[in-house]
Structure formats: C-alpha cells, structure tokens
Image: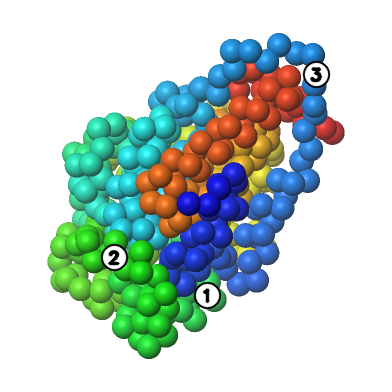
Amino acid sequence: MPVITCIEDLRQLAQRRVPRMFYDYADSGSWTESTYRANESDFQALKLRQRVAVNMEHRSTATTMVGQQVAMPVALAPTGLTGMQHADGEILAAQAAEAFGVPFTLSTMSICSIEDVAAHTSSPFWFQLYVMKDRGFIASLIDRAKAARCSALVLTLDLQILGQRHKDLKNGLSAPPKPTLANLINLATKPRWCLGMLGTPRRQFGNIVGHVKGVDDMGSLSDWTAKQFDPALSWDDVAWIKERWGGKLILKGIQDVEDARLAVQSGADALIVSNHGGRQLDGAESSIRALPAIVEAVGSEIEVHMDGGIRSGQDVLKAWALGARGCYIGRAFLYGLGAMGRPGVAKVLEIIHKELDLSMAFCGRTRITDVDKSILLK
C-alpha cells in the first residue's frame, strides 16, 4: 500500500485501478472543462491569514447541517454511477460517512438502490432527486426515500438537460460497460475492479431498473433516461415536491442571486451553490466565486452550502469563511473509493478533517463555528 498523504495520491491510484470510462466519467467536465478547472483553481487564489501565540488546544470542527450534527461541515455529494467506481460503491461510501459522522447523499442515478443502502447502514442518509417527466415515478422515489428514513431530500435543479461531456461520448459510457474490443482490453488491465464486480449483483441503475414499467435492461433504460429528464422543470414542481416530501429540503444547483432568492421563497431549508462540478454550463462562474454574493443576499434567510472543486480541508475552511455552512465532496471521495473502496473513502475524510483542523488552528481559531472571513487576507 503506498503512503497516502493527500487527495491527489488517491486520484492517481484511482486512475490506475478504475476502468477508463468510469474514471473519465468522474474526472471530467463539459466542453472545454474551463469551469471544472476554475472550481479548483479559484480556491488557490484565496490566501489565509496566519496567527501565532494563540492557544490551539481543545479544537472542534463539529457543527450542524440542516439541523443534523456533523463531525465537520462536509457531506458526500450525490454522484451517479458510484457503484461503477468500485463494486457496491454507494454502500461502502455510505458506511464510511456514517462511521466518520458526516452525511452521505445517494444519487437517483446510483447503482445500489435506496433500499440497498438503507439495509447496510444504521444512520439516516440523504437522497438526491432528479426531476423527470414521469411524475408517478418521482412520487414513488420520494415515498421510497421516506420508507428508508432518509433525513433530507436534495433536489437537483441544474440538470433539466444534459451538458455535453466529450470523454463520455468517446468512451461510449454505459453501465455495465459494453463488451467492445477497446473496453475488454482496458478491463483486462483492471483485475481488482473486475473481481469486485463479479462478486456483486449490483451492476445497473438500482433505483430505476425493476421500478419503472418497461425498463428491464440497459438498452431500454438508456432510451428512458434520455427522454425523461424534464426540460420544463419550474418552481411549481419544487413546491409539489416539497409538499410530497414533507421533510428537510435542500436545493442544489444555485449559481445566481436571483435564483437564490427564489430558493428562499420556496421554503427550502438550504441551497447548494453549485455548477454541477463544471459538468453542465462550461464557462459558468466557479462555485467559490459565486458563493459570497449569494451568502450576502440570502445567508440570513436560508442555510447556504456549496460544492465544486473541494480537494482539501483548506478548501472547506475557505468556503466556511465565505459563508458556506456545509461543503460537499464528490470527486474527492470517488477517488478514494476507486482507489481503495471503503477504506479509501475513510482516508479522504481523515485527510480533509486533518487539513481543516490544522489550518483552522494556524489561523488562530479553535472552533469552526468561530471562523469568519477575517481569517482570509484581503
């Protein structure tokens, strides 16, 4: 086992161990990938203010996200095809998050189903919902999330239509992989991944296959999903979903102050400043740059979270300083999962927590709840 000291170490290991199409699916953005890159690089422009001779004992990164106690202001983001990074990936990631004390968010487009994850965890997790034209199916997903005791619903608003991701098209992304010559050659170099997949029955979209009339295989599923994402999604749909769900509601995909104000009016409990990891509108502002204006506009009326580009505990600290009361990691935990399974996800959380804890102390703070923008240099 190599010495793992940072998220980049796990990314490199995942790139070696995960089949190309699934690694590329996680590690790519739309079109030129400029927003994907800016999500990371814009964090680097923020500089921290070092303080000395401050008592650094008794530190705590504990806080709450939508009223739930968390060990640090971090949640695992909803990511599609997580179970293709590693066999039973959603279950393993949820177990690692539960053990660490942070929320796990299951994607609608997961390989392991809502019921799978509920059966293998003891703490409530969060469920992410895509809005599709089949409202009966959406209603059944919400009801299944309730039955599984999910403690928050994360409604994604920025995927009414799908942004073009060149790598996915070139790789012929599918789950499971199509048995093309190129795929078979690539899979032959990933024996660890292949053995894991042979040992699980979970190789398709578990929340959909068997739950939608007429969707029994991947061919019909591909047709169904292409037709089902709803370009007519509106705030009226948000109101219907909120009423149907009845619990904590988080709106994901807010990048504009006007939309943030509409999120407040919707009665949601939190919003996530997000550009879908740079996978939708290429050329959109990075999440960390969009965050301050949204916090200033609505931060006293709704809990503001963010995702996009977080690769370290320092990124979490900077986001918190700018007003985010929760941060979501997607690619970072996928790297850990693809590299080492559940221990890899645990390692990601350990790395981020240690970096957050130490950086907070170097900035002269001992509690995350006492951190504000004064720790950043002007």
Position of residue 218 measured from the top left corner of the image (x, y, whole percent): 25, 74
Q: Nearer the viewer, mark 3 or mark 1?
A: 3
Mark 3 and mark 1 in contact? Answer it, CB < 8 Å.
no
Amino acid tagged 3:
Val
Position of residue 342 measured from the top left corner of the image (x, y, whole percent): 37, 46
Q: Nearer the viewer, mark 2 or mark 3?
A: 2
Q: Which of 149/139 is in front? A: 149
C-alpha distance separating marks 3 and 1: 47 Å
Amino acid tagged 1:
Lys
Q: Which of 316/149 is in front? A: 316
Answer with mark 1 or mark 2, whichever residue precedes in sequence: 1
Q: Which residue bears the numbered disc 3?
A: 52
Residue at point 66% right, 52% down?
Answer: 40
Residue at point 45% right, 56% down?
Answer: 339
Answer with mark 2 or mark 3, whichever residue precedes in sequence: 3
Q: Which residue bears the numbered disc 1?
A: 167
Q: Which of 127/364 is in front? A: 364
Q: Nearer the viewer, mark 1 or mark 2?
A: 2
Compared with 358, 316 (above or below) is: below
C-alpha distance separating marks 1 and 2: 25 Å
Compared with 302, 327 (above or below) is: below
| Quadrant in the rendering for residue 307 | top right
Q: Which residue bears the numbered disc 2?
A: 195
Residue at point 51% right, 22% down?
Answer: 62
Compared with 85, 301 (above or below) is: above
Amino acid tagged 2:
Leu
